[in-house]
Amino acid sequence: MELSMAANDKAPVAAAARAMDAKAIDQAIAYLLMFAALFVTYFAS
């Protein structure tokens, strides 16, 4: 019974880690898009 409890304890941690990774990826994409817009605004014209 301890093994099943240990397996269940690790699942929410892994899910939370994936959620934080997804948030970090979304934030990185947003920053890249902002830098692209800044570059186009100031240097392309």
Image (tube, grey):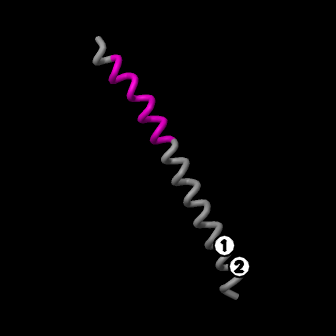
Q: Indicate left or right for 29 with 17 as reference.
A: right
Membership of 12 in magenta stretch: yes
Q: Indicate left or right for 28 with 9 as reference.
A: right
In the rendered image, the vertical position of residue 29 relative to residue 3, given as above or below: below
Identify the residue at horizontal 55%, vertical 48% (top origin).
23
The quarter holding residue 9 reads top left
Identify the residue at horizontal 65%, vertical 78% (top origin).
39
Q: How many other residues sit within 10 Å of disc 1, few (<14), some (14-19) or many (≥20)?
A: few
Identify the residue at horizontal 55%, vertical 54% (top origin).
26
Principal SS element in the magenta part?
A: helix
Residue 38 x, y percent position in the rendering: 68, 74
Identify the residue at horizontal 38%, vertical 28% (top origin).
10
In the rendered structure, which amino acid carries the disc numbered 1?
Answer: Ala
In the rendered image, the vertical position of residue 7 relative to residue 26, given as above or below: above
Marks 1/2: CA distance? Answer: 6 Å
Residue 32 x, y percent position in the rendering: 58, 66
Element carrying mark 1 = helix
Identify the residue under disc 1: 37
Element carrying mark 2 = helix
Q: Indicate left or right for 37 with 22 as reference.
A: right
Identify the residue under disc 2: 41
In the rendered structure, which amino acid carries the disc numbered 2?
Answer: Thr
In the rendered image, the vertical position of residue 13 relative to residue 45, given as above or below: above
- All told, the count of numbered labels is 2
Residue 5 numbered tag? none
Residue 42 x, y percent position in the rendering: 71, 82
Question: In the image, which residues are magenta?
Answer: 5-19
| Residue contact between numbered discs 1 and 2, judged by CB atoms under 8 Å | yes
